[in-house]
Image (cartoon, grey):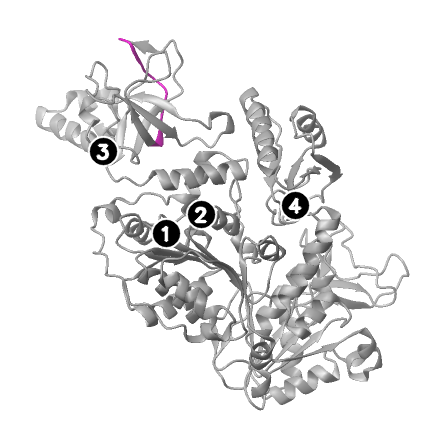
Amino acid sequence: MSSENEPEQGGARDAPPEQLALIRESVRKAQTPRAKPRTWRGAALAKELPVARVLVDKGVLHLDRYFDYAVPEELDADAQPGVRVRVRFGAGRHRVRDGRREGGGLIGGYLVERLAESDYAGPLAALAQVVSPERILDEELLGLVRAVADRYAGSLADVLQLAVPPRNARAEKRDSPQPLPAPPAPEPGSWARYEQGAAFVAALASGGAPRAVWNALPGPQWTQELARAVAATLASGRGALVVLPDGRAVARADAALTALLGEGRHAVLTADAGPEKRYAQWLAVRRGAVRAVIGTRAAMFAPVRDLGLVALWDDGDDSHSEPHAPQPHAREVLLLRAAQDRCAFLLGGWSCTVEAAQLVETGWARPLVAGREQVRAAAPLVRTVGDQDLARDEAARAARLPTLAWQAVRDGLRHGPVLVQVPRRGYVPRMACAACRTPARCRHCSGPLEGQEAGSALRCGWCGREEGAWHCPECGAFRLRAQIVGARRTAEELGRAFPAVPVRTSGREHVLDTVSDTPALVVSTPGAEPVAEGGYAAALLLDGWAMLGRPDLRAGEDALRRWLAAAALVRPQSAGGTVVAVAEPTLRPVQALVRWDPAGHALRELAERAELGFPPVSRMAAVAGPPEAVTGFLDTVELPREAEVLGPVPLPVTAPGRPRRVGAPPPGEHWERALVRVPPGRGAALAGALKAAQAARTARGSDTTVWVRIDPPDIG
């Protein structure tokens, strides 16, 4: 055995001097201590403005305020308002040495301002470090972040984490490109199809601030129209910001802007970009090198200089709602920016949300719509198949597709691709008894049984157990039928019906961006429809009842939005474009689809919600948590006197292994939810009261969770 394994017989202590030197050098290299920011003990303070007001990066409501720190003379030059800093946080009053507070853990933050003296009477700790001299937080961005935090009862630090991307040193060291001169004002182009379209573009080019709700005509021209609005704003010497729902829409808008303005005039900000690229693009915008920004909701806080236009496409899309605290919606953030910067505002989409209709109804924005003749020229022919038609249709009883849909597919495949929209992904997501329609449930956890593949056993959607010998507990039957048929099962059935035609699917696992203009069947879930070159020859909208039957206030609005998004990809009626919707034609959303009248549908929905006192006419907040915690929270919060509390009511229990939605209880826990409603004009008071109550709970160190959300998207 070697001496290295026997330290009691010598080892390093008996080693010659040369070997000891080698050992010490190797240890020194292996355990190089990391440099820690100094406490600046005894260091001289800055001669002018020796106090720094710092926003610490602690997303805790009872610490949602600024803290004062002393500025050492050595950091005086770099410690400017807007830079990232590190400070020691958490030291008590007893940790004072030589008149300077010491101790506490290191934490990041932002230097907000420099002061001559502090309001705090006790000793101040010194700034530990200026992370970077890059000034990234100015008064304009700080004011926006504070407005969003107040609007959603959140903390300033949480909103700043959404607004400012993480630092990347390599990107920060690179110089941003030189800003390009303003481009010439563009021609109206396809904006001339709208009644006030040319005037809107002219107002942007002249430096005006028009506010509009834009009901876009079907077809691919919307990206070119957005690009012309951005170009007109840049021509006036101002900046522009466009927020889109997903990366595919961003890529189309990026291509349209590049084709119209060339390279280097706009930045693309998305969460999918790598940290270095994203931060480099963000810095180029912050430094004024780029005046136009497009991106997903990650771009809604982009620090565009001299902002002249904020635009949002398809505000009803769920992806515009931020899942991280305090969960702001991109539409509301851009509305705050339009008011703060007094800039133009454009809210566009093929559909129209109730919130957009309210902006028009109150006169805050003007409608930007096309005449009925233009709508009829651009929209496809929409036909419906209702329950009575299905009852009389022999083909519909024997197969999934009714005769009208079958004919539309057959005729459309002669001229190009056909789109089939299916509400659910998968094979057969839900099964039921063929005799009495009782939903098929798992014997172990009562979860829904799902069909996976043809001929395979049923599997529970919650616990994953297979079920090979199911029988109905109500009537004893053994046969099953599909409650809702998924996209893969639909693709399989269509493939057998049209064996010579290729079938492609687009959904969560694999989303197609584009398809060619050759005949093909494209089966897609809502929101994943690829764009066809030259447009689809026809489209089928299957299982409309599955979207309309959801127990949600927005079910009709959401169904119409998804139908219009699919139908807008179809060729115009003059080119043979046909859409067949399998839904009851007497329902209001179906009638709005046939007439292609999303604005009229939204206005009627708004009138009904005004009568019932539902959002957006009223402001609402959701309070969820364990029953005792919710009751205690509602007892302590000082709500406005006009507030009305609805509930609390039990929430569905999240099954183990199932994905947990935002605000849903942890798996196996029983939560309740209460809704708090206030009339218009009292939303700020409601948010302030809820925030104060939450801050008091966190200050007391409460160990129970109470989840608060302003303007919950799903209220049942």
**Which of label 4 and label 2 is nearer to you?**
2
* Region rendered in magenta: 98-110
Residue type, label 3: Ala
Distance of mark 2 from mark 1, alpha carbons?
9 Å
Q: Residue at x 67, y 74 (%)?
A: 595
Q: Residues within 10 Å of mark 3 (few under 14, many from 20)?
A: few
In the figure, 650 relative to 125: above or below?
below
- Can you give x and y, in whole percent of width and height, for residue 343 in the image? 42, 52
Q: Residue at x 18, y 25 (%)?
A: 74
Distance of mark 2 from mark 3, alpha carbons?
51 Å
- Secondary structure under tag 4 reads loop
Which residue is tagged 3?
A: 30
> Quick one: 238 or 94, which is closer to the camera?
238
Q: Residues within 10 Å of mark 4 (few under 14, many from 20)?
A: few
**Quadrant of res 471:** bottom right
- Secondary structure under tag 1 reads strand
Q: Residue at x 87, y 64 (%)?
A: 436
Upstream in sequence: badge 2 or badge 3: 3
**Which of label 1 and label 3 is nearer to you?**
1
> Quick one: 206 or 385, which is closer to the camera?
206
Upstream in sequence: badge 2 or badge 1: 1
Q: Residues within 10 Å of mark 1 (few under 14, many from 20)?
A: many
Distance of mark 1 from mark 3, alpha carbons?
51 Å
| Apparent side of residue 64 relative to residue 360 in the rendered image (left or right) | left
- Secondary structure under tag 3 reads helix
Q: Residue at x 71, y 55 (%)?
A: 607
Which residue is tagged 2?
A: 337
Upstream in sequence: badge 4 or badge 2: 2
Label number found at residue 656: 4
Specify whether residue 107 is painted magenta.
yes
> Quick one: 99 or 516, which is closer to the camera?
99
Do the residues bearing badges 2 and 1 touch, measured as CB atoms within 8 Å?
yes
